[in-house]
Image (cartoon, helix red, strand yellow):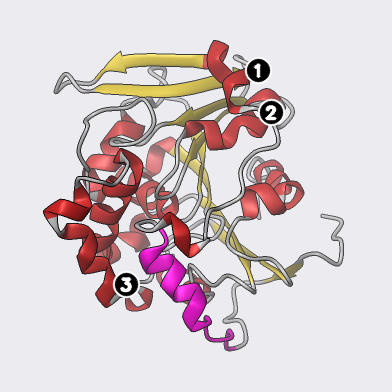
Amino acid sequence: MPRSPAHAAVDTGTPAAPPRPSPAGRLCSAVGVILATVGCAPPGPQAAQASTAALRHQMSAADGVAISWLRGGDAGGPLLMLVHGTPGSATGWADYELDPPPGFDVLALDRPGFGESGPAGAVTGLAEQAAAVVALLPADGRRVVLLGHSLGGAVLARVAADHPDRVSALVPPAASLDPAQESIHPMQHAGAWAPVRGMLPRAIRNAHAELMVFKPELLERQRLLPAIKARIIIEHGELDDLVPMANVPFMQAHLTGAACVKTLLLPGRNHFLPWNSAEVVRDAVRLALEPLC
């Protein structure tokens, strides 16, 4: 793949020791979802989110809770499923829905507890989050490409481990998979206080609940990672202060059952790769269809 100076490819060997995330960055990771005034609001798509309204779909899951998603692109092409981090929603993928990777059928999910998907409260289990993705897998049994940003990468890793025959490739930009990199900042406990919790918007409240139990969720699911058989294209910004780059060697060490693993480290890029490095993310989607990474 032609490469610009903005990113570099690294094979499956362990990368050099990553820089330690700054204290301010980790504070944003822990507390920014609680206090908007911290100033960690992520960038978003260039397209107006309202422009995706015509792509909206919804159904009721087996438990009666609504699952909502956006769908665009080539209905006859390979299915690319996009899953956001925390907080977030399907509309964060508006650029990818309105200008899909060529030839792809593109589905962006509102994860349970976010966007227009139910329930009102948080769904903190990775297994339950993964079940919403599985409910939207093609009924004809064809294999899919999964792309999950940040915490969404952990959700899709669970899907790929539980259903290896349904996933051809997994693309986890800035994904959180290493439990050793997760910690709870003391200020996060403030979000559990009823007076504070009641003042928070739904997305922030549910994101906080996810983060409070995310480390034990990752620890419990770590043993499943070798079951992933898909091609994997890891992407990570070297200046990611929210999800440490130490996640990269962790993934390389634990994704031992993968058909192949390719790593793209992006100098000068931070956590928000789907928006500030869209060309690299789109390249990874194209690579996902190749026989080898």
Report the amino acid beneath label 3. Pro
Does 60 sit above or below residue 82? above
Query: Of marks 2 and 1, which one's residue comes earlier in the chain?
Result: 1
Residue 197 seen by the camera: yes
The quadrant of the image that shows the N terminus is: bottom right
Report the amino acid beneath label 2. Pro
234 horizontally vs 129: left or right: right
Single out the residue that lies furthest toward the top. 54
Q: Quadrant of residue 104?
A: top right
Residue at which label 2 appears: 100
Residue at which label 3 appears: 179
Query: Of marks 3 and 1, which one's residue comes earlier in the chain?
Result: 1
Residue 177 seen by the camera: no
Does 14 sit above or below residue 132? below
Residue at which label 1 appears: 74
**Circle 3 SS class:** helix
Numbered label attached to residue 142: none
The percent coordinates of residue 185 (x first, y second) are: 30, 75
Q: Is 210 one of the magenta-colored residues?
A: no
The quadrant of the image that shows the C terminus is: bottom right
Number of numbered discs on residues = 3
**Residue occupying image coordinates x 63% and y 55%:** 273
